[in-house]
Image (cartoon, rainbow, N blue to C red):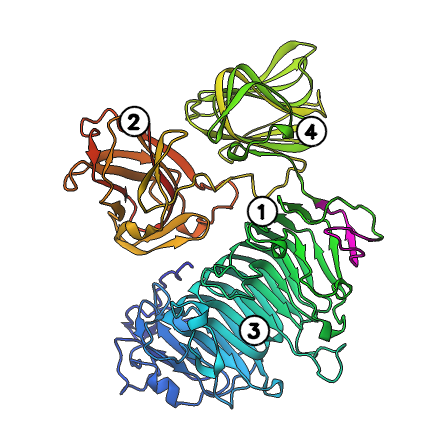
Amino acid sequence: MIPLPPITRVSKVGNVRNAELPFIPVDLGKGTTYYVSTSGSDFNDGTSPQTPWKTVDPVNRITLKPGDNVLFRRGDVFVGAHLALRGNGCTEEASWITIDAYGDGANPLFKDASTLQPAISLQSPEITGGYRIRHIDIDTYLLGIAAVRVEPEQMIDGLKISDCTIRNITTNRYFDSQPQLPCGAPLAFGMWLRYVQNLDVCNLTIDNTDSPFQFCGGLACFDNMDIQNSHIQGIMIYGCLNLNKYDEIMATDGNVVIQNSCIRYTGDRATKFGSTAILTENIRNCIIRNVEVGYVVNTLGGFDACALDWEQSNINCTFEQVYAHDNQGPFVLAMEHPESLGNSRGNVIRNCVSVNNGRFGGAESNSFINYSSYNEEYQKIRIENCVDISEKSTIPYAVTSKEEATFRDEGRENFPLIVENLISGGMDICAHFNSYNREVFETVFNAHQYGNQLVLHKDGRVRTAFSASDYAISTYMKGNVQLRFLSVNAENNYEWNIQTDAILAQKRVCGELILLKTIPVPGLDTSEWTRVRVETEQGTIRTYIEEILVDELADHTFMQGAVELCSLATGMVREFFVYRYIDSQRHVVDYEVEEAVPGGEFIMDSQNGEYGFFSPEICWIPTNMYYWEYRPFRAGWGRIGDYGAMITRKDVQVDVTFSTGIQVVMMNATQNGTVFLEFSPDGVNWYGKPFDTPCMDDSMHWVFRNNRPAFNRYRIELKDLPQWTGSIHGLRLRFAAGCGTVAIKSVTIYR
């Protein structure tokens, strides 16, 4: 969120020139404007920037009228504030009641509540709507913003919430030990909005909450939300059935839009049922579009953990352009209960990408869609133009007809789905070499497996049985390895020769080798592990190194063929993927790079001679961190609070005499790419080396954003330091940045 720039205003009264006046929003209501600043006094009248109130108490005592405004000074922190609003606004122009900021700097912050009351409450019975809440940040409460009515007849009409950050709304407990919060809330909610219509939420960040928000109402738009670390439950959108007639859903409960948003890391404190990023129930005309959902888990080992929980009695709802990846459960869980009598209808999933879902569990963890144990006749969903990529892909083949299709899967028959252009699977060749299977290749010659690597000796090769026209290839390689694609045979193909600082883009025509171009790639080192990705599309060839596009060229000599890896000397490969479509948003990055995470006792892998440590991060000591926590999927995440931030492990005690260095797998989401790896031979003195990492603005730290740094391996050679011998007693990573986020997957001492 970008603070508003300082604005100097000048007015003239005779020949007297006023001093600088603080910035005041220009689109306020036409009523009375009240000012609140920690530098003020509750004995002031609060009606000017020069006479502000000090706390929210005077605001809580007045009844606001249409067009009134309450402005909080930017940069001020209101500790323990509970703003309990009273009075009615109006949605007509200039008649909204506006809660906003004035002055320069960061948003005003409501922080550190000591009671169960929400930071901002629209609970007063006389409130009927017409409120705008803007540029207010909330930190460390049990309830952020609450607007709750008991009956739909008491609907709050007209609420706008924008440009706010809500964080640390949590009990820090697991679900089973949650207290009962005000208004009966079983969770700590960033926003709890019940029976609200004409709701507009825009540019909202919710971080570290038990649940981001629960909404029941209609005519709502949630736009540009960044939601992460929802410990128990994600977004919950509810409607109400007419209990006397199941085929009617109340007209007020619908027309909800959730768009342009990211929802990440939900469920680490879990519920046995209901751990999901987005839940819809008894809703009509709901649209969820252009949303990314990742890393939903259920740490209790129960059910769900899905990206989208499509609960009972949804009518005319659409999920489109949703990218769901790396969720423990399925992309969509359809749960039409028998008592709803098959009420759902008109629902569509279109233009969605499902990657690596259904990661764990049994039948409840299918990858794309799961109909629960209820009768499939009630689950009516049309699927159009979707892609599902997973080892647990549950729809076994592509259907291009617009006619109703019948699927047979796991003994079930007659699924009432209408399917158009669904690609299931999508990944024709998939090999991680710690689960290596030669049967996926047509040819393996002069190669053997060593640990989690495939070693290619001189002239060794691996050729796929897959042959097509347009596809994407991704491989993680080391050494002098050549990538051949659109290969008709050994005499006719494209050959990308990976070299230090360059790629030779060549083609072989009737055995004659022709150089197309030399692609310069400064810093490319064949002695290090490198991710190479090539996409072919209708004669266009794109080349990526570490997910960065380094070249695009056009050549139409070969339009179809197989893929193979060849080694001109000795090379090694850890991953080899071939996708039969090229628009994979995942960009084929394997984040499960090691069986190690920060913390724990050192072990020795007898197969490849590496030391690692893999128990929770509590064995590491963070310094100058806002927080450091263990996250699902083997990563320790830390938020840097000051320069010199570090994470230290002081009880290493391992003999490194025969080791050469340390490998770190990490992501650096700061604005300084320098990280210091240091070791201590005695627990007191520290020695080491700096290394450079790709870095980025902390606001862009989400690892799946295209062409942004993600988890990378860094091997730091320490054998040339005289102190690197005998037994060491400490390791630490020290960061040159003063703020940002870092994530560490593993730290490994190698021979």
- Whole-angstrom CA distance, mark 2 to mark 3, is 56 Å
Q: For marks 4 and 1, give the CA distance.
A: 21 Å
Mark 1 packing: few (<14 Cα in 10 Å), some, or many (20+)? many
Q: What element does badge 1 sit on? A: loop
Q: Main secondary structure of the magenta part?
A: loop
**Residue 671 appearing in the image:** yes
Spot occupied by residue 585 in the image (x, y as percentages of width and height): 58, 44
Q: Kindly indicate the quadrant of the structure image that contains residue 50.
A: bottom left
Q: Is residue 130 above or below residue 714?
A: below
Give the SS element for disc 3. strand
Residue at 43% over, 39% down: 594
Mark 2 is on which residue type? Thr
Q: Label 3, label 1: how many angstroms apart (C-alpha)? A: 29 Å
| Cα separation between marks 3 and 4 | 48 Å
Amino acid type at mark 1: Asn
Residue at numbered disc 3: 215
Camera-side residue: 184 or 163?
Answer: 184
Q: Earlier in the sequence, mark 4 or mark 1?
A: 1
Residue 412 magenta-drawn?
Answer: yes
- The residue that mark 4 highlights is 466
Give the amino acid at mark 3.
Phe
The residue identified by callout 2 is 660
Disc 1 from disc 2: Cα separation? 35 Å
* Residue 145 point in image, percent of width and height: 46, 75
Quadrant of the snapshot with the N terminus? bottom left
